[in-house]
Amino acid sequence: MEFRQLRYFVGVCEAGSLLKASTRLHVAQPALGQQIAALEHGLGVKLFDRSSRGMALTEAGRVFLEHARVVLADADRAREAVRATDAEPRGAVSLGLPTTAGLIATVPLLSACRERFPQVTLRIVEGYSGFLREWLQGGRLDLSLLYGDAPDPALSKRLLMEDRLALISTPGDRPVPRKLTLAALADWPLILPGPDHGLRRIIDEACLKEGVRLNVVAEIEALNSVKRAVEAGLGGTILPLGSAADEIAAGRLRGRDIASAHMVRRVVIATSVTRPATSATNAVMGLVTEVAMEMVKDGRWPAKWVGKGG
């Protein structure tokens, strides 16, 4: 198995046919077909189902695609690490952001990276914290913000901040004090993400510890859809204040702190312990830490900084 075969394989997967892939890869179609056949022979499995409509991955092919992408990404990281030893950081860096953090931090991080490290191509991937952890461990991400600072043998974590959760509702809703107890939310109609969502798990665990049962009237996985439903007057929700900062500033939503020690998320920046970091990854890690700290201090990220340098 050769690196070029892996690149050809990924290229065919993305193109969907040998003809399209040969054009994109600048390789003659017969030669490309021979390399794919040689790869299948070496692996002892069939990677594609071939038909007049193109090349469709088999189940073995789908499994192999994930591994091929990780191997190629590691090779690219190694190449960039060698090239960057005596130069400014350069190359691609994949950064994971939980969706609630992405709403706050994506634009400031992109702007800072473009200004400070123009030779670095920052790729931001948003997703559930659990998915981001898996992608980080599997090599699809170089680093990621995650929620939770519990020890993890697969990851190296650096604590940054504590993100408090708040009741988000419309300004015209019932009068509420600046701070609410968790028990005071028991009769609020709430729209929350499903039980598998990391945010929902924190809420459910806090309610269990305090003996509170919430009135969940709907479950929506997409954060923007949750906020639109709240704006429409269909109920309130529970989010970090920063996740609704724009809507609160515009007067479309209202935020109230929840006075509970359990309604807090600890934000960490994490890397895989099994994958060496490039100079670009280290530079972006330092930049993320710096930008996040500045955003907490000036109020753009309503949270408490508990990391180093605060």
Image (cartoon, rainbow, N blue to C red):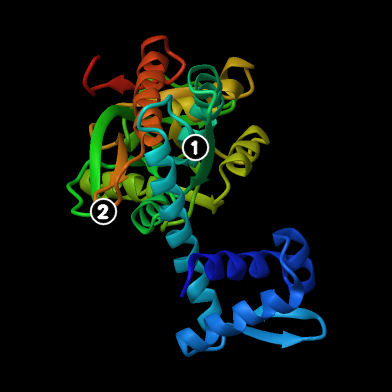
Percent across and percent down for residue 123 are 54, 40
Percent across and percent down for residue 20 are 78, 67
Residue bearing mark 2: 274
Q: Nearer the viewer, residue 275 or 171?
A: 275
Residue 59 makes an appearance in the image: no
Q: Nearer the viewer, residue 211 or 70?
A: 70
Q: Nearer the viewer, residue 197 or 28?
A: 28
| Amino acid found under the numbered disc labelled 2 | Thr
The span from disc 2 to disc 1 (Cα, nearest Å) is: 20 Å
Q: Residue at the location (56% across, 42% down)?
A: 223
Instruction: Locate the C terminus by quadrant.
Output: top left
Q: Residue at the location (70% across, 61% down)?
A: 25
Left or right of 162, for residue 37: right
Residue bearing mark 1: 91
Q: Tell me: residue 11, above or below residue 141.
A: below
Q: Secondary structure at mark 1?
A: strand
Percent across and percent down for residue 1 are 46, 75
Residue 76 makes an appearance in the image: yes
